[in-house]
Image (cartoon, helix red, strand yellow):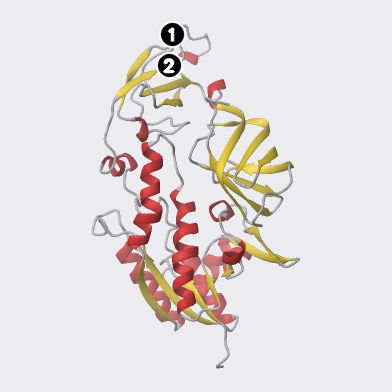
Amino acid sequence: MANKQRVVVGLSGGVDSAVSAYLLKQQGFEVIGIFMKNWEDDDNSEYCSTRQDFLDAASVADVLGIEIEHVNFAAEYKDRVFAEFLREYQAGRTPNPDILCNAEIKFKAFLDHAMRLGAEKIATGHYARVRERHGAFELLKGRDPLKDQSYFLHRLNQAQLGKTLFPVGELPKTEVRRIAAEIALPNAKKKDSTGICFIGERPFRDFLNRYIAKEPGPIKDEQGRVLGQHVGLSFYTLGQRQGLGIGGIKAKGAQKGGNDHAPWFVARKDMANNTLWVVQGHDHPWLLTPRLSAQDVSWVAGHAPAAGDMGAKTRYRQADAPCVLQPKGDSHFDLHFKEPQWAVTPGQSAVLYDGEICLGGGVITTDAASA
């Protein structure tokens, strides 16, 4: 058919995008695959899977009988995503580059490229859904609660959502795997990727070492005792338990009942004095915060929702926490939680939900230490 709608699918080499392409072809679309290369500084290393991922994506395209194009967005990625990632870490915050990658690369650079290829829409293997209602587009959670990725997509706007399909968003992961096996996709049993695209599976601190200078300083407990030395505040995040190097130290005046051997957690990062503050016990008050502020806000509808009760995630894979939203214009908001939240981390995103509808979110600016 000459008048088939053309959809360009981001083929990552993984099973979700592969099944997405298959489903679209079954639905009668003209499907073209694009493999995005976003990182090339050390893509020959043991940790970088770009070459294998492209081979997997090309094998999928061959089985499905679709074209595939290899597109290099590494320059855009370094400029728009990685530079911001480093800036945030150097400022002592903990950014989420996957969110920025979606907003700047997958649904901007990739979308623009697809439109130049004459595409009507783009598609990815994300577990999320788009619904058009009353002339506007809504971003919905994926049907599979264990795989929902709307958190990472909350910065998408109306124009982007109007051009986007999420074919596996209606399916549980088990069904996606079943389809892949049934049609004999070569990557049907490939493990889901973990880790940030440009870091892969390599040790995170080793990676940051190459870009951020170490500035050692004291590790202190809440009494102000020096327990050890940190290697640089950029290398730690709130709530972190591993890699502190102070495991054997007892708390002064620890209560009976074993608290003297309770694990240590990063609770505060004092950039001005280059001091890392740690506390003992998962539920220490310094790790709990009843409210937060966020900036660099993005609302799916293009404007802030009304103040009131809703749910929020302050990290991926967290249940929606009941809270009250107080918008401060369209660019800032405050959240007041019904129950204090654990290790709320500046640089991460607070994402708002009204049931299954993802409303948008912002970058957290205040944490447990300042709440």
Question: Residue shown at 49%/36% (left/top)?
Answer: 346
Question: Residue shown at 36%/55% (left/top)?
Answer: 79
Residue 369 image point, x, y percent: 52, 25
Q: Which residue is mark 1?
A: 252
Residue 119: numbered disc: none
**What amino acid type should be assigned to the residue bearing mark 1?**
Lys
Residue 173 image point, x, y percent: 56, 61
Nearer to us of marks 1 and 2 is 2
Residue 54 image point, x, y percent: 35, 69
> Label 1, label 2: how many angstroms apart (C-alpha)?
9 Å
Question: Residue shown at 56%/24% (left/top)?
Answer: 283
Classify residue 153 as left or right of residue 266.
right
In terms of depth relative to the viewer, which is nearer, 250 or 294? 294
Q: Residue furthest front?
A: 329
Q: Are marks 1 and 2 in contact (CB under 8 Å)?
A: yes
Quadrant location of residue 126? bottom right
- Dot 2: within a 10 Å radius of its alpha carbon, few (fewer than 14), some, or many (20 or more) residues? many
Question: Of the residues under marks 1 and 2, which one precedes in the sequence?
Answer: 2
Q: Which residue is mark 2?
A: 221
In terms of depth relative to the viewer, which is nearer, 95 or 149? 95
Dot 2: what SS? loop
**What amino acid type should be assigned to the residue bearing mark 2?**
Asp
Residue 312 image point, x, y percent: 64, 43
Q: Quadrant of the N terminus?
A: bottom right
Q: Residue furthest top?
A: 253
Q: Quadrant of the C terminus?
A: top right
In terms of depth relative to the viewer, which is nearer, 151 or 181? 151
Classify residue 211 as left or right of residue 16.
left
| Image: 358 above or below 178 | above
